[in-house]
Amino acid sequence: MLEQDHYQKLNLKYNPFSFLNDQELLKVTEERINLNDLALKIMSTSSCFIEFYGKKGKGKSTLLQSLHSKHLANSTFFKLKKKEHSYINTIPGILIIDSFQLLSTKNKLELLTNQNKLIIGAHYSHKIPYFPKRKLYKKINFSKLELDINLLRKIVHKRIELACLDSQKESIKIKDAHLQKLLEDHGNNLREIQLSLYDFFLNPNNELYELSTICRY
């Protein structure tokens, strides 16, 4: 059982790796691909099919949300959920769909065939040779995207900064040796790393962190 002031003692408002809403998540997102460049290409072409695919926990959903919110604000965005039966019609303009694999086969085929500008996130690739060719086609396998210690350090610092209680006081800065161990244990599975860090903040091991003015990092 945590003490009532457990996080306050660490100069935190809450566990930095607890659930974040969409707006908070955008604040701590590190763009592992050049989304601005991708957005410019999407806007300048007459047709496109872009797919972010790979296993769970690789950061696909976060970057799709960032692409929509920060770079393609005029696009239409759907974030599908399990056990919700959704049907999406083709639209003029740019359509972004997260968890595309949850749509029915019929709906997927209709969109892949008829949606002029389609951007999807899914667990596996949906490119099929006989579908109409778009002028811009790009597939990004998130299972192969590198997650190195420099990027992980930035992600962790942003999370702690957002949760910081008083920017003038010191807070936890996790040592690189522990971040490296997390990479060795979990590879590029960002979700598993974040779950481990959530547990870390429940009972921080003082050998794995130092105090720093990280809130002004």
Image (tube, rainbow, N blue to C red):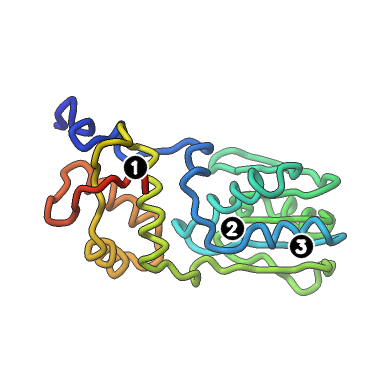
Q: Quadrant of residue 187?
A: bottom left
Residue 23 or 189: which is nearer the viewer?
A: 23
Q: Amino acid at mark 1?
A: Cys
Q: How far across and down, in percent of the image, does residue 94 sit?
A: 78, 49
Per the image, label 2 sits on a secondary structure element best described as strand
User: Who's the residue at 50% across and 43% down the image?
Assistant: 27
Query: Left of 81 or right of it: where is 56?
Result: left
The kind of residue on which mark 3 rests is: Lys
The quarter in which the N terminus is drawn is top left
**Residue 122 numbered tag:** 2
Q: Residue sitting at 76 percent across and 74 percent down?
A: 129
Q: Answer whether labels 3 and 1 touch (C-beta < 8 Å).
A: no
Distance between the alpha carbons at the discs numbered 1 and 2: 35 Å
Q: Residues within 10 Å of mark 3 (few under 14, many from 20)?
A: few
Residue type (three-letter) at the residue carrying disc 2: Ala
Q: Kindly identify which residue carries mark 1.
A: 215
Q: Identify the mark nearer the N-term, 1 or 2.
A: 2
Which residue is at a point 35% across and 52% down the rendered structure image? 156
Q: Which residue is mark 3?
A: 41
The residue lying at 20 percent from left, 48 percent from top is 211
Mark closest to the chain's N terminus, 3 or 2:
3
Residue 71 at x, y = what percent? 68, 49
* Mark drawn on residue 123: none
Disc 2 crowd rating (10 Å Cα; few below 14, some 14-19, many 20+) is: many
Q: Secondary structure at mark 1?
A: helix
